[in-house]
Structures are given as C-alpha cells and as structure tokens.
C-alpha cells in the first residue's frame, strides 16, 4: 500500500481527472459517502448520536458537506458549521455547499471577525453533539496553524467522539522529517483517509492523533499508484500473507530445497545472540543451519542447539573470532554448500574480529545479512559496504547506522526515511533500519514501512532474532524464485507479528527476545489463516 504525501496526493487526484476523465466531484462524492459508511461500521446505529460537521473553505470542507448530505439522506439531522466566508468556497466544495442549502439545511457561518475567543468557547460549550466530524483543514496546510482556526481546533477535544476527514486538522503531510513541533490538532477516534495513507497517519508525532485510521477507495485508478516515482510503501497484513503463500511447500519437498544458512557470531559472554540467530533461521523454515562460533564458545552453543550444526573458529585471547580462522582455507571450506550468511550478532569489537568481518564481506560473494557487531566493524567506513553485483542486507538499529555513517543518532532519526533511501541507492544494499515502524530501503529506491511490532520488542536480542529470520527466509526464497524484496519484507513483518503475539501473553514490560522467537510459529499460522480468509 502506497503512502502519499500531500503533493503526491494532489498529483494523483489531478491525473485521475485529466488522464482518466473521472470528475473531481465524483471523487469528493465517494469520499463523503464512504466516510459515513465507515462511521456506521465504527459507531453502529448513528441515530443514537447527535452529529456536528465542521467545515473549512477547502476540499476537506467540501467532503464535510457531502458527509452532511448523506447523513440527511439516512434520516439524521446534522448540525453543519462553516468556518469561513461562503464566498471563499470554490469548485466542488462550493457545489456541495449549494446543494445543502437547496435541500433546506441551515449552515451556520462562524467568522473570525464576529467571534472572540470567549464567544467561541461559549459556542462549543452550547454545542450538543456526541460526534464531531472534523472537516476544517486537509493535507495541504502550511504549519503552524495559529489564530482563529487554531482556537477552533483546540475546542474539539472536549467532545466524546471526533471523526477526522482525511487527517486530523492541523497535522502536516508533506515533510518526512518528523521533527517535534508545536502541534495543534484534535485527537481523532476515527480518521478516514482516501486512496492511500499519509505520512502523519503512520509516523509519530502525527500518528498519535489518529487512534484508528482506515483507507477507503474513492475511484483512483490503481495504475496511478503503481508508478515508481511513488516510492514510500506501507506493508499490510494482506500483502505479507500474499508473499507467504508463495512459500507453500510441495509434498515432495526435502531439506535441500529450503536453503542452508551459515550463522557466524558469538563471543565469550555473548553466545546467546548467536544461538537466537541460528534458532530463528530454523524456525522460519531454513532447511539446514550451521552455527560457527569461536572455539571457547562451542561447548556452550552446542548444548543449546539440538537441531543446529556447529563449527569452531579460531579465537582471540578474549574469546572472539580471530583472523586466524582464515588460515589453511578453513573459511573457504566452511562456506561450501551454504546459501546465505547471517553475520554479526554477539561477535564483539576486538580488532582482529573486526578485521575478520571486513575480510569475509570483501572476499565472499554469498548473500550476507549483516547485523550488530558486523555493522559496527564498518563504523565510519560505509563506502566499504557495496552491494553491487551481490546481495548485501544490513539490519542496523539507529545507533549502529549512525556510527556507520559517522553522524549523530539524533541527526539520523530526524531524516531517517530519505536518509535510508539515499544510502541504499548509493551503496546498492538492502537496508533494514530497525525501530518503531521499521524501514526497509531497497536499492531500487522503494522504501517499505512495517506495520507490525510493539514497544515491548525494544529489548536486547530482538535484532538477533530478526537476523536469523531474515537469513532463513531469504535463503529459502532465493532458490524458489521469490523476489528478494518480498522475502525481506516478509521477514520484517513476521518478526513484528511474532512480537505482537508475544505481547498478548507477556505484555510490554516482560517481553524478551526469546518470547519473540517462541512465537514465530504462531506468526506463521496467524498469517496463513489470513491467506485462507
């Protein structure tokens, strides 16, 4: 599902009218009638509610007039307010305003010059409405909202239920930086947006103002949303389920059909990370998994991983992987027969270990999922990570990515979407930036925003589980010709879904990484049940 900024949405609407001949008035009609239908789904019988519709002078207000008309057609008697001079209404908004007047509806005009702040407060206190429909401002506003309209918006939170048309008034939908700002916006119980979600529905702080949002189609041709220039995507459960269906197994399958993952990680004191990576690769269906760890760690991991093959690597004096692991062709032998490498969890930061990682990435052409200390081995040396003519997947959290780029974490987070996209394109790598709304930036320029996951997953080891899941799914997907991007997207979604299922049992605070791993199978079953619905 595409995520569209305000300017992109305007372009799509314009193309819908100019290229396909679909009247803009029909789009507005579909928006207003669809919103009323969503209100009925959410609230049930609207006849038990008194409803007020607040309209501005733009197309958002025009949608509000259509909402009011469809409520009237259902036998309701909405109160309608226009917070602008009627002569300021243009185009389709003006048309729908006039239709309401011809139907005999009294539309009360509230003008700034006639309403002091005190008088405005009195107006809203006297307004007997249990549901207020917010059609004041749309997606194209310029921040900050101040003056008269800001005072109007501030009054909305006193009502039991607020329904926002397209977006709660006062939120900005053009920028992708999401720096904290002084926001004046109502908290909407239900937000109904059209054609595609907007950035403020997905990302905080804007997302905090829409408790529930739904997208409804209003007649935009699907072809317009599939253009490559629209590069920001929201991964839905339905889309993840469609990819999972491609991984259905034939009755005659055997373990060799589903990839052999080589996980390289661990050091004394950090064996758990390597074990979770290897086990997670198995849990997502990898046919075979080999876990290579420093020699002192071998007895520890071998006792924890019954189904996993283990290999010992030469170790440093502190119990991490040494560059001596390359001696006598040991690594070359270890790589034979493997389909993908999961590299990094628990490796540590010993200089020899860092050099081991750099050399392995440089010398092998096998697909690599690089995480944690594997990424830290390239801190300040991002140019060394190039995915041209190979598959290189990076899964950093913001701190690791910031160290890789040599910038502050704060600066990175301020521009994480476009920054991730630029890096993935320049270095031709697949970048998965973990965090709330984990991002996957593809070398193609497309960016995918994950919809699953919860704050309980902010715990040590969560990323190690993702590394294993991704190596396992990508490894088994490649020989089956499942698109690489699809495998990565599915990995991220299933990881978040497993975390969501764990949260249902453990809650936010007690959830640990092994709980995520323990729920991988349930995540598969949950997503498969969606496949067959």
Image (tube, rainbow, N blue to C red):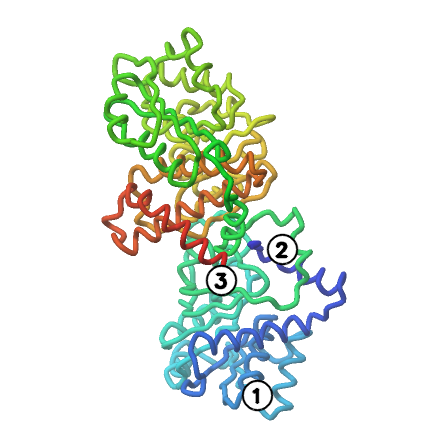
Residue, disc 1: 73
The residue positioned 58% from the left and 43% from the top of the image is: 446
- Left or right side of 6 for 92: right
Estimate the spatial distance between the alpha carbons at disc 3 and disc 1, rounded to whole Å.
Answer: 34 Å
Estimate how packed mark 2 is, as few (under 14), some (14 to 19) or many (20 or more) residues with alpha carbons within 10 Å.
Answer: some
Q: Who is closer to the viewer here, 187 or 57? A: 187
Estimate the spatial distance between the alpha carbons at disc 3 and disc 2, rounded to whole Å.
Answer: 33 Å
How many numbered dots are placed on residues in this image? 3
Q: Is residue 206 above or below residue 391?
A: below
Disc 3 element = loop
- x and y percent of residue 476 in the render? 49, 36
Q: Is residue 127 visible?
A: no
Residue, disc 3: 533
- x and y percent of residue 375 in the render? 42, 27
Tags 2 and 1 touching, CB below 8 Å: no
- x and y percent of residue 112 in the render? 50, 76
Q: Who is closer to the viewer here, 268 or 64? A: 268
Q: Is residue 139 visible?
A: yes
* Residue 491 tag number: none
Marks 3, 1: nearer the viewer:
3
Chain-order first, disc 2 or disc 1:
2
* Residue 8 tag number: 2
- x and y percent of residue 111 in the render? 52, 79
Marks 2, 1: nearer the viewer:
1
């Amino acid at each position: 599902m595409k995520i569209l900024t305000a300017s992109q949405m305007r372009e799509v609407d314009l193309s819908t009218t100019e290229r396909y001949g679909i009247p803009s008035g029909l789009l507005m009609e579909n928006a207003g009638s669809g919103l009323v239908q969503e209100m009925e789904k959410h609230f049930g019988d609207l006849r038990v509610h008194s409803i007020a519709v607040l309209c501005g002078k733009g197309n958002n207000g025009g949608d509000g007039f259509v909402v009011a008309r469809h409520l009237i057609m259902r036998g309701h008697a909405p109160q309608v307010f226009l917070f602008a001079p009627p002569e300021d209404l243009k185009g389709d908004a003006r048309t729908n305003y006039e239709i309401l007047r011809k139907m005999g509806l009294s539309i009360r005009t509230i003008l700034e010059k006639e309403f002091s702040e005190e008088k405005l407060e009195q107006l809203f206190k006297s307004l007997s409405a249990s549901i207020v429909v917010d059609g004041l401002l749309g997606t194209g506003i310029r921040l900050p909202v101040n003056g008269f309209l800001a005072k109007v918006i501030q009054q909305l939170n006193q009502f039991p239920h607020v329904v926002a048309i397209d977006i709660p008034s006062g939120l900005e939908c053009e920028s992708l930086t999401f720096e904290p700002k002084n926001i004046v916006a109502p908290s909407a119980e239900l937000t109904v947006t059209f054609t595609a979600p907007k950035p403020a529905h997905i990302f905080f702080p804007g997302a905090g103002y829409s408790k529930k949002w739904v997208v409804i189609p209003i007649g935009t041709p699907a072809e317009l949303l599939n253009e490559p220039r629209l590069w920001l995507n929201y991964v839905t459960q339905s889309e993840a389920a469609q990819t999972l269906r491609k991984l259905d197994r034939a009755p005659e399958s055997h373990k060799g059909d589903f990839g052999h993952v080589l996980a390289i990680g661990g050091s004394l004191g950090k064996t758990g990370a390597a074990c979770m990576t290897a086990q997670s690769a198995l849990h997502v269906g990898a046919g075979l998994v080999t876990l290579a760890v420093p020699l002192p760690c071998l007895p520890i991991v071998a006792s924890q991983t019954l189904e996993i093959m283990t290999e010992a690597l030469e170790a440093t004096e502190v119990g991490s992987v040494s560059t001596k692991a390359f001696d006598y062709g040991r690594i070359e032998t270890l790589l034979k027969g493997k389909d993908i490498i999961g590299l990094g969890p628990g490796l540590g930061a010993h200089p020899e270990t860092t050099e081991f990682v750099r050399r392995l990435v440089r010398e092998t052409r096998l697909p690599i999922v690089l995480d944690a200390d594997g990424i830290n081995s390239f801190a300040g040396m991002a140019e060394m990570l190039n995915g041209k003519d190979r598959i290189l997947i990076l899964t950093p959290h913001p701190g690791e990515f910031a160290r890789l780029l040599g910038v502050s974490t704060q600066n990175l987070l301020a521009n994480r979407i476009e920054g991730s996209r630029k890096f993935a394109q320049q270095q031709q790598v697949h970048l998965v930036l973990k965090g709330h709304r984990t991002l996957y930036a593809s070398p193609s320029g497309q960016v995918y925003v994950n919809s699953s996951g919860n704050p309980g997953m902010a715990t040590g080891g969560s990323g190690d589980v993702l590394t294993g899941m991704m190596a396992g799914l990508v490894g088994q997907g490649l020989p089956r010709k499942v698109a690489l991007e699809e495998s990565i997207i599915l990995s991220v979604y299933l990881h978040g879904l497993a975390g969501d299922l764990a949260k249902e049992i453990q809650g936010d605070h007690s959830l640990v990484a092994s709980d995520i791993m323990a729920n991988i199978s349930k995540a598969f079953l949950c997503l498969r049940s969606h496949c067959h619905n």
